[in-house]
Every structure is written in C-alpha cells, then in structure tokens.
Amino acid sequence: MILVVFSSLTAKYPEIKSLMKPDPNLIWIITLMVLIQLASFYLVKDLDWKWVIFWSYVFGSSINHSMTLGIHEISHNFPFGHHRALRNRWFGIFASLPIGVPFSVPYKKYHRDHHRCLGVGGLDVDIPTDLEGWFFCTTFRKLVWVIFQPLFVIFRPLFINPKPITYLEIINAVAQITFDIIVYYVLGIKSLVYMLAASLLGMGLNPISGHFIAEHYMFLKGHETYSYYGPLNFLTFNVGYHNEHHDFPNIPGKNLPLVSEGFDKYFHFSWLAI
C-alpha cells in the first residue's frame, strides 16, 4: 500500500525525486552540536547542584532532544547517503555520545519497522502498549508517563518486539560506556549527571517532546499521522513535517517544506497545546 501511494505521488509530481538526495550539511551541524554539549559538560562541572539541574533542563535538554532527531536523520542515511550506509552508522554512534546511552544503532533497527508497519501493534514500538493506555489514564498518571517517556521509548521494544543484538549495537554500547566513564573521571559526577538528566528531561518534560504525542496519536479517527509547521521545526530538523516525512522518507528534513504545499494533510498548530 505504501509503495502504491509513493509511486502515484512521484508519478504525479516527478520533481519530488530531485529532493531525494543526501544532506551533507548534517555532518557539520551535528558535529557542532556534539562540541557544544561537550563544552557545556566542562562549564557545569563546578556548579552547585541546583544549577546543574537548572542548566540541564533549560539548555542541555533541548540540545539532547535535538540530537535524537539528528540521529533520526542519520538513521535515514541522509548525512553520507545510502551508498555509504556504514559511515552513517559510525556517525550515529558519535552523535549519540552526549546523550549518555547507546541510542543510535538500536534506534535505526526499530525505526525501519515504524515506517514499514506504522501503527501495527507488536511491530511499531513507537506507539504505547495496551497496558500503558490502560494504566496511565488519569491526569497525574499521564504526567508521570510524560516525565518518564524516555524509559518507555528505550525499554518498550525489548518487551514488545525483541530482536537479536547486532555487532554494531555492541560497538555502540562499548563506545558509550567508555565515553561516560571518561566524562566521569575527567569532569566529575556533576557533568555526568548533567548529561543524563538532559536526556531524561529532554525527552520527557521539554516542550519539544510534544512531537512524540502529536505525530501518531489518533486525534481524528482514521488519521494516524499529523504534521506541525511551527518554529520548533528549526530545532528539530523539520520533524514536524511528519506527513511529508512518511510519504517521502528518502527526503531529508531540510527539503520537506518544499513538498508540503499542495498536499491535503492533518496538522497541529502547537506541540504545547495538544
């Protein structure tokens, strides 16, 4: 079905194929983001704890959440192109270092299922389980779910659709653990906590995290994917252009606004007010 829709759209709009090309600018943008976060590790190492947590939320959480969406771009092989897929995997391992957990390679493995089996229970691990929907049904419980959403993102695949561990995942884990140990011994416990707190807060209570809920939760019956065209796309590699992304997953984020016009789609005005 997806291939039929894709073929019909590209047949009607052949110029779209010209947008399906790598975006090498991602290499420099993501590398700069890594360096900025490394600098922030150094700057917080001697701060009081209250300021460590403050800056991890105000600054670090946005950088780390944006980094996860940079890794999303990497998972589609946009920095180096499909013909250099392994370079993209190495670059993803590098990009995930400031996040504090081995995120990149496992994400790539499960993200393919998200595109191929969108909304299919047991295969698409981006959607909450029936147990989550049953238990987190009050306002307070939903708040708890939002706060700890990163943990559900990490552990849900292991319970819903476990897959064999690959050698690249082992390399990703070893590189990440080594990096975390270096941060601890060179910069201290505060820098390590800043890094991990930034990831927890960035994918939990940070306003950008509204896209987790906005993208694929069914607000209108029969419509599983929604876009967002507001300013937060500047920080998220245009992930808000989500209908466009699922229609054309081979188009990098920077080009998605070019295919947005002329298509009927459902969208949110805000990630904060969903």
Image (cartoon, grey):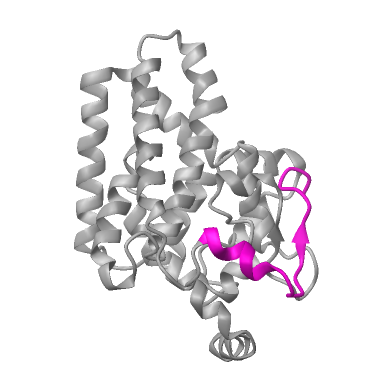
Q: Residue sitting at 40 percent across and 63 percent down?
A: 78
Q: Position of residue 99 (x, y in %)?
A: 39, 39
- State yes or no: residue 269 in magenta: yes
Residue 123 visible in the displayed image: no
Quarter occupied by the N terminus:
bottom right
Q: Which residues are magenta?
A: 253-274
Q: Is residue 82 left or right of residue 110?
A: left
Q: Residue sitting at 64 percent across and 45 percent down?
A: 232
Against 225, residue 60 (above or below) is above
Instruction: Name the foreground residue: 149 vs 93.
Output: 93
The number of numbered discs placed on residues in the rendered structure image is 0
Q: Is residue 15 left or right of residue 47?
A: right
Q: Position of residue 159 (x, y in %)?
A: 44, 61
Q: Position of residue 115 (x, y in %)?
A: 51, 73
Against 209, residue 17 (above or below) is below
Instruction: Name the foreground residue: 28 vs 89.
Output: 28
Q: Is residue 25 left or right of residue 5?
A: left
The image quarter in which residue 167 lies = bottom left
Q: Is residue 134 left or right of residue 111?
A: right
Q: Position of residue 202 (x, y in %)?
A: 53, 37
Q: Residue sitting at 72 percent across and 69 percent down?
A: 261
- State yes or no: residue 165 in magenta: no
The image quarter in which residue 227 lies = bottom right
Residue 112 visible in the displayed image: yes
Q: Residue sitting at 40 percent across and 16 percent down?
A: 44
